[in-house]
Amino acid sequence: MSVMDLRGLNPAPVTAFTKSGEVDHDANAKVARWLASIDGVKSLVILGHAGEGTFLTSEEQVALIRTYVEAVENRIPIIAGITGEGTKVAALEAKRAKDAGATGALVYPNHGWLRFGYQKGAPQERYRAIHEESGLQCILFQYPDATKASYNLDTQLEIAGQPGVVATKNGVRNMRRWYTEIPKLRAAHPDLQILSCHDEWLLPTMFDVDGLLVGYGSITPEPLVDLIKAGKAQDYAAAKAIHDRMLPVTQAVYHRGSHMEGTVALKIGLVHRGILDHATVREPLQPLGLAAEREIQAAMEASGFASARQTQAA
């Protein structure tokens, strides 16, 4: 097995819909081609939270994977979010993704665990079943410490040592755990690729990782590629300068009432950049309104991203 190289930026794109609410395959292909054309983008991770993956039918999910695979023309791997509730359901979901052309699986926890917690050994079995059924390369997804689906260190270490697990997307959002657990994961599994997904506060995590797996990467990939380079070089001054430049966008997109609103905000930002024509979302997501649209557009301009109309006029 040739292991996916995720040591760079791995955007988690939004899913484009038509104004009537259907999956817009032409628009999604445009997003895929644009992101794949940027040097430093290593994969595209679809059907996650930013991509409204759980709002799509299984048929829509498969069709979207095929659209992305065709659009990138094998230049980079397509990774599918696997969100099915039961282990067997998730394994079959992964098999469909593999058959549609996906290379990897971002394995979400069983969502019942968010409220009730998980039984010892259940997460390990979920990863084992998904890999054995599909052959997809798996990414360990570490949820925020505030949830009951945030795996303890022993669980992470065991999953990371299982066949087919090649990376971890860490979003623990507890720096005490981050500074304790990341070094231990590295020591136990030196080949495990460590990816941060702390969209709203990337700077503190940039100096310990191989790359990023973030929805943020679908709206401003260019500076995030530079941020990764600065982090790998341990150049705090350069990383801080990029962070400060991007702070208006970070605040407009992610410092909102709900993290889920970030998906809507990302679409508005892509409209500003001329990648999408409109920011249609699927319920239960709701539009943010005209005031928020203006706020996000102003933040994009403050961070140096002229609107598509301004660029075309120039």
Image (cartoon, rainbow, N blue to C red):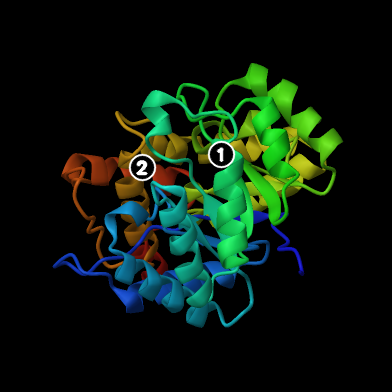
Q: Residues within 10 Å of mark 1 (few under 14, many from 20)?
A: many
Q: Is residue 45 left or right of residue 176?
A: left
Any mark on residue 255, and which? none
Q: Position of residue 219 (x, y in %)?
A: 46, 54
Any mark on residue 123, and which? 1
Report, in whole angstroms, how far the alpha carbon at label 1 lies from the one at label 2. 28 Å
Query: Secondary structure beneath disc 2?
Result: helix
Residue reaching furthest top? 176
Q: Nearer the viewer, residue 267 or 300?
A: 267
Q: Residue at x 33, y 55 (%)?
A: 267
Q: Residue at x 47, y 74 (%)?
A: 68
Q: Residue at x 29, y 28 (%)?
A: 257
Q: Nearer the viewer, mark 1 or mark 2?
A: 1
Q: Residues within 10 Å of mark 2 (few under 14, many from 20)?
A: many
Residue 39 in view (yes/no): yes
Any mark on residue 262, and which? 2
User: Height in image: 186 above or below 7?
Assistant: above
Q: Position of residue 146 (x, y in %)?
A: 46, 21
Q: Callout 1, which amino acid?
A: Pro
Q: Position of residue 244 (x, y in %)?
A: 57, 34
Q: Residue at x 73, y 54 (%)?
A: 163
Which quarter of the image is occupied by the N terminus? bottom right
Quadrant assignment, res 134: bottom right
Residue 314 in view (yes/no): no
Q: Nearer the viewer, residue 310 or 261?
A: 261
Q: Nearer the viewer, residue 218 or 23?
A: 23
Query: Secondary structure beneath disc 1?
Result: helix
Q: Callout 2, which amino acid?
A: Gly
User: Height in image: 273 above or below 257?
Assistant: below
User: Height in image: 165 above or below 60?
Assistant: above
Q: Position of residue 224 (x, y in %)?
A: 60, 49
